C-alpha cells in the first residue's frame, strides 16, 4: 500500500521501474536472486581490495608494499560498480522499501563517508603511502583514514544485511 503523502519523485522512480521493465525483471523467479549474487560477488571484490589496503595501512598486515597492493584497485572499482548497479536495481524495483528504510539511509551515509574518506586519502597521503616499503609504518593520517575506511565499509555491509529487518510499508 502506497501512503497518500508519498513524494512525487518516489512515485516517478517506481513508475520508471515499471515502465523500463526493471520491476518485472527483478520480480521473476531468478531476477532478484541473481542480482543478490552479483551484489555479493561485487562486495567480495570490493572488501578484498579495500580490506587488504586498509589492514596494511593500519599496520596489521606487513610484508606487502603499498605500491603492490595498489594493483588491487581495479578489482575494488569493479566490485563497487557491481554493487552500485545491482543496488540501483533493488531501489528502482522497490523504492518505497528502500528510501524510507533507516538501515538503507544509514548505509548511504556510510558510503558517503567512505567516499569522502577515499578522497581525503588521495588528496592528503597517497603519495607518501605508495612510497612505503613492505615493512614500513604508514603515517598516522593514513592509519586514521584506514580505520575510518574499514569501519565505514563494515557498517555498509551490516546495514545492507539488516535492511530486510526494517520494512517500512510491510505492516
Image: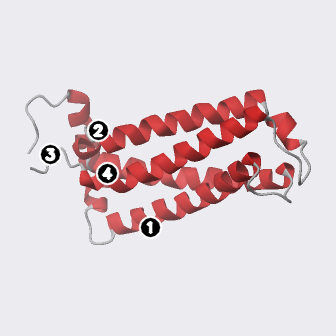
Number of other residues with Cα within 10 Å of mark 4, as a class: few under 14, some 14 to 19, many 20 or more? some
Residue 143, position as x, y percentages in the image: 72, 40
Q: Which residue is mark 2?
A: 99
Q: Is residue 171 left or right of residue 133?
A: left
CA separation in Å, label 2 and label 4: 11 Å
**Residue under numbered circle 1:** 37
Please identify, in this view, whether the residue under mark 2 or under mark 4 is nearer the observer.
4
Q: Which residue is mark 3?
A: 169
Q: Earlier in the sequence, mark 3 or mark 4?
A: 4
Q: Closer to the N terminus: mark 2 or mark 1?
A: 1
Of tags 4 and 1, the one toward the viewer is 4
Q: Which residue is painted at 27% across and 55% down in the image?
A: 164
Residue, x 28% and y 51% (percent of image)?
A: 93
Q: Secondary structure at mark 2?
A: helix
Separation of disc 4 and disc 1 at Cα? 16 Å
Q: CA distance from mark 2 to mark 3?
A: 11 Å
Q: Which residue is mark 4?
A: 163
Q: Could you tell me which secondary element the residue under label 3 belongs to?
A: loop
Q: Quick one: which residue is furthest to the bottom in this view?
A: 29
- Label 1 CA crowd tier, 10 Å (few <14, some 14–19, many 20+): few
Relative depth, front residue between 35 and 117: 117
Question: How far separated are the C-alphas under marks 2 and 1?
Answer: 22 Å
Amino acid at each position: 500500500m502506497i501512503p497518500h503523502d508519498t513524494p512525487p519523485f518516489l512515485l516517478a522512480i517506481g513508475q520508471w521501474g515499471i515502465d523500463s521493465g526493471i520491476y518485472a525483471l527483478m520480480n521473476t523467479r531468478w531476477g532478484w536472486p541473481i542480482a543478490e549474487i552479483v551484489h555479493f560477488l561485487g562486495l567480495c571484490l570490493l572488501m578484498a581490495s579495500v580490506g587488504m589496503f586498509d589492514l596494511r595501512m593500519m599496520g596489521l598486515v606487513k610484508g606487502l608494499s603499498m605500491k603492490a597492493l595498489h594493483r588491487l584497485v581495479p578489482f575494488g572499482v569493479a566490485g563497487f560498480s557491481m554493487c552500485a548497479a545491482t543496488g540501483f536495481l533493488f531501489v528502482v524495483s522497490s523504492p518505497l522499501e528502500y528510501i524510507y528504510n533507516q538501515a538503507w539511509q544509514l548505509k548511504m551515509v556510510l558510503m558517503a563517508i567512505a567516499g569522502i574518506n577515499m578522497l581525503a586519502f588521495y588528496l592528503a597521503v597517497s603519495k607518501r603511502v605508495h612510497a612505503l616499503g613492505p615493512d614500513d609504518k604508514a603515517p598516522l593520517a593514513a592509519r586514521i583514514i584506514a580505520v575510518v575506511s574499514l569501519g565505514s565499509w563494515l557498517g555498509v555491509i551490516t546495514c545492507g544485511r539488516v535492511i530486510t529487518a526494517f520494512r517500512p510499508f510491510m505492516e
